[in-house]
Image (cartoon, helix red, strand yellow):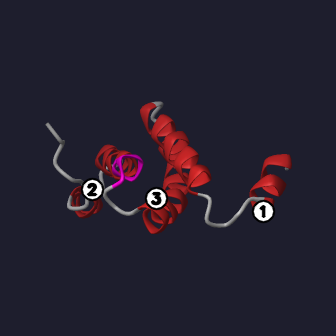
Amino acid sequence: MVAAVRRKQAVADDWREASARVQLGSCLVALRRYADAEPVLLQAVPALEALRGATSERNQAGFRALRDLYANTGRAADAALVQNKIQPAKP
């Protein structure tokens, strides 16, 4: 409840909240809590993409988490769509 109120009071274009939610979603995927992770990532990834761009490292982590979620829940077509947004690793 308190967290929800704080989120509403936060500045709408604060990329740090979206970044934290991407991290939360990534952790939930790692814990195989896919049903919990999906709505978090589906909200956070596009928000962060709009604020920081698709190539930001944190957004790339969000794309990877979504890809893994889809791959591990048998949604290969969705995983392939997200895979197309993932940039090659920098040397």
Label 3 to label 2: alpha-carbon separation? 14 Å
* 36 to 80, vertically: above or below: above
The stretch in magenta equals 56-60
- For the residues carrying marks 1 and 2, which lies nearer the camera in this image? 1
Q: Amino acid at mark 3?
A: Val
Overall secondary structure of the magenta section: helix
- For the residues carrying marks 3 and 2, which lies nearer the camera in this image? 3
SS category of the residue bearing label 1: helix
Q: Earlier in the sequence, mark 3 or mark 2?
A: 3
Label 1 to label 3: alpha-carbon separation? 18 Å
Residues 80 and 5: in front is: 5
Q: Amino acid at mark 2?
A: Ala
Q: The C terminus lies in which quarter of the figure?
A: top left
Label 1 to label 2: alpha-carbon separation? 31 Å
Question: Disc 3, disc 2: CB below 8 Å?
Answer: no
* Left or right: residue 88 compared with residue 10: left
Q: Residue at x 84, y 56 (%)?
A: 5
Circle 2 residue:
79
Circle 2 residues within 10 Å: few <14, some 14–19, many ≥20? many
Q: From where the camera sits, is residue 36 visible?
A: no
Q: Residue at x 49, y 35 (%)?
A: 27
* Left or right: residue 91 compared with residue 79: left
Q: From where the camera sits, is residue 32 visible?
A: yes
> Residue 47, percent across and down?
52, 64
Circle 1 residue:
8
Circle 3 residue:
45
